[in-house]
Image (cartoon, rainbow, N blue to C red):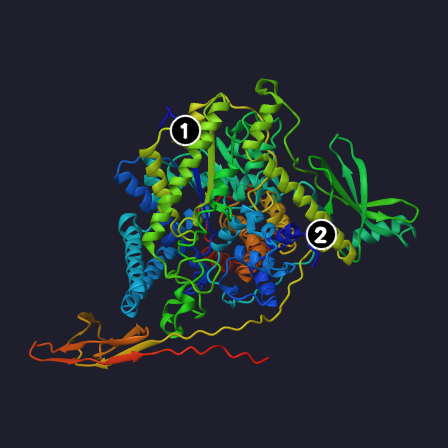
Amino acid sequence: MKTDCKGYLCIVLHAHLPYVRHPEHDKFLEEDWLYEAITETYIPIINVMQSLLQDNVDFRLTMSITPPLVSMFADPLLQDRYERHINGLIELAAKEITRTQWEPQLNHLAHMYHYRFTNARDVFVNHYGRNLANAFRKFQDTGKLEIITCAATHGYLPLMINETAKRAQIKIAADHYKRHFGRQARGIWLPECAYEPGLDNHLAEQGMKFFFTDTHGVLHATPRPKYGVFAPIACPSGVAAFARDVQTSKQVWSSIEGYPGDYVYRDFYRDVGYDLEYEYVQPYLHGGGNRSNLGIKYYAITGDTDHKQIYNPTWGLDRAAEHAGNFMFNREKQIEHLASIMDRQPIVVAPYDAELFGHWWFEGPDWLGFLFRKIYHDQNTIGLITPSEYLGRFSRIQVATPSMSSWGYKGYNEVWLEGSNDWIYRHLHVAADRMVELARNNAGVNGLRQRALNQAARELLLAQSSDWAFIMKTGTMVEYAVMRTKTHLLNFNSLFDQLNNGTLREGFLCELEGKNNIFPEIDYTVYS
Amino acid sequence: MARDPAARESSLAALSRKELLEIAAKRDIKGRHRMPKLHLVSAILKEELPKTPAGQVAEQTLEPAAIRAGQIQQEAEQAKYMLGPTPPHEEFFPLEAELPQEYGHDRIALMVRDPYWVHAYWEITPETIDLANSELDGDHLNSVSILRIYDVSSGEALRRFDVELSGNATNWYINLGQPGGTFCVDIGILTPGNRFYTLARSNTVSMPPVGMSSVIDERWMSLQEDFERMYALSGGFEVGASSAEMQKMIEKRLEEEMASGALFSMMSPVYKRKERGFWFKVETELIVYGATEPDAAVTAQGKPVQLRPDGTFTLRFALPDGKQTIDLTAESADNKEERTITPEVEKKTYRPEPVLNE
């Protein structure tokens, strides 16, 4: 870590997917969320870190890896299925190499995908024993990566009313982190960056030292933060809040300055799953045989036109390097200016969805690699830092309470509370209250009853994932989100009735335990 | 079309990609299916522009400058769940039951949506209503159901205003108009004689403030101008601006909802309109297939070809315009015989101008 620099940059990637696992189907469309993210985001990020390590480039990165994602990484069924999935893609890419031999530009890309898929399989199977949590843990142990946790199932905490239910989301996450990463979680990414005053008490109780808010969370804190968003504040509970910097997020997200929309970058929407002849791609599609994305994409964004240019990876890489240089230059100017008016080293916090890198922004992981290399080799103004390191260096922090906020559109809770999804809360709230009631009325039970209570807790947690409300709002795969919300609530309600009426059915319980098997070590007394 | 472009842009930006596609279909925007959300918004805005005489610059205010980063971020976040441009329709096992409409307990719950708005939902059991009616002793005739909003910021419950409920509403969005305040809500019956009978009381919620706090900690003092400078550098004025804009938008929407008398349910109607717009695409592939002894070695263009167990094989090539030759060679397992077959294929594509039948 550099200490003689003028200020710090803290890059945070939030890696999350909801728990999707359907042993009852041989192939299941939404499981692709995980498989695509593994191939396009997690493995490319792992590869970038690996190459930085090999080249002795000192870097710092903070990543939240959520409990559902870690659980899916560790699940043997999903591991098998990922291997099957990537083998299918390797086979398809090989066919593409033959098919495109009279079209050199496409052929070049077919080779590129074939290489990437083969590499992904190699990294997945041979390097990390089919569990990518091992990869991230390895980088954390080098001190270059700080892994933080997130609420147990990415539940949207400010819309949860029941304090015990909020506490359970945090406590289960803290325990899960310890089990998988072998140490205590020092920090947390609040789901959707959504904070409300008082949440920090639950974090403090689990020994967590920091979390993040969107810009206005800290900026509108009470009392007024002296350093704006360029230093963390400490909640009355002692937990520190770091806030997102507007400029760094604009640089990636703005329609004008934003990098990922550059015309030479690869287009996300055009995919051979839709573009090629049906019978040819059919074996690689899902059981139902509906067309879906397969991950081989040949075109560049090109611009506002139907006639997309074929993607040129060399140009894409060049542009990513250029954008990394531009990002670094802007941070140097920003930090120089801040350092000149602050009486301590500023910290600029730049959090992004991890799945932006690679999946949506194909060149994103390369951009990250270029940025880290440039920061290491080309300048002395900025130092990369993790929140824990920052808190180790600066013990004097202003005490203030952040404002309620989230990083969703419009900055508060509206994305998760509006016409398309507000119906879920009356059911979620009742289920949470009932869970607390169950736990309190069933202290110290064992055997079947204990198992049923643990499963009830799993069903509640799975229903609480903020992903479902988000999907209902944004209109992609809505039916699935509705189905999941209802299914887990119905499962919960059945268990609740069976527990109260003394009519527990072991067969039913076993079926749920097999299907919705997140958190095998869960202890329902977390709700009492 | 006398609309405020910025407001129109915000309202478009708030729609889903699917909804935008429907609007784009109505406006007959070409290439809409391939456009990311951002481009759809600007294409629709462009289409809705008042047509101005050549030479006059009318578009400059409509460049996507104001499309906020948040929208693009949301689109990228959404991409995580997107498995294709047209989400494949899925059949799930039918649910064994539906969620209950009621849980048999009186309850009203309050959730914060943003600094101005809260959402309330409730359930009141028929027993509670019967009890109320009998206690009101005939007074309940001509009475109305209301939400009564209390400001409890000071520790005391100060009555702020009532919202009369229409029909059999079970939820409501309420504009409290007081960022930073603390509130709770009663649902109850208001009689013509102004008697209020409480059916249920909500949880208490605290609204987030808008803007920089007025509270200053002496140990972390700065000059006023330094506070303002840090606020500006932190992007505070952008946050502030978007909040003001948001309030404007919300007020406008509220007016519209009032006019349409549908305030209790802001659920946006789901349009199922068939999209119009025509396109046509033709690609050509060449399939080459053949058979030999199962243990023979076959190559195409010098590269080995995988034979099926019965000795057949199939190759498939994207076929561009022009002449292509494919060298196919089979060599017997004992290396004693080699045969070569070389098909030659020429492809041409004609694209006459489209015919428009008016």
Identified by mark 2, the residue type is Arg
Q: Quadrant of the C terminus of chain A?
A: top right
Please state the horizontal and vertical placement of residue A329, each as a whole percent of the image: 41, 36
Q: Badge 1: few (under 14), some or many (20 or more) residues near its Cα, within 10 Å?
A: few
Alpha carbon of mark 1 to alpha carbon of mark 2: how far?
47 Å
Q: Nearer the viewer, residue A92 or A125?
A: A92
Mark identifier at residue A389: 1
Looking at the rendered structure, whether the residues under marks 1 and 2 are on a common chain is answered as no
Please state the horizontal and vertical placement of residue B120, each as a whole percent of the image: 71, 48
Query: Residue visible at 53% across and 73% down?
Result: B278
Q: Is A432 positioned to the left or the right of B197 in the image? A: left
Give the labeled residue for mark 2: B253
Kindly tell me whether residue B111 is visible in this rendering.
no
Query: Residue visible at 47% across and 45% down?
Result: A252
Residue A310 sits above or below residue B287 on the image? above
Q: Nearer the viewer, residue A241 or B90?
A: A241
Residue B210 sits above or below residue B95 on the image? above
In the picture, residue A228 is in which quadrant?
top right
Q: Badge 2: few (under 14), some or many (20 or more) residues near its Cα, within 10 Å?
A: some
Question: Do the CB atoms of the residues marked 1 and 2 lie less than 8 Å apart?
Answer: no
Mark 2: which secondary structure? helix
Please state the horizontal and vertical placement of residue A480, each as a whole percent of the image: 53, 60
Identified by mark 1, the residue type is Glu
Mark 1: which secondary structure? helix
In the picture, residue A393 is in which quadrant?
top left
**Chain of the residue that carries numbered disc 1 in the rendered image:** A
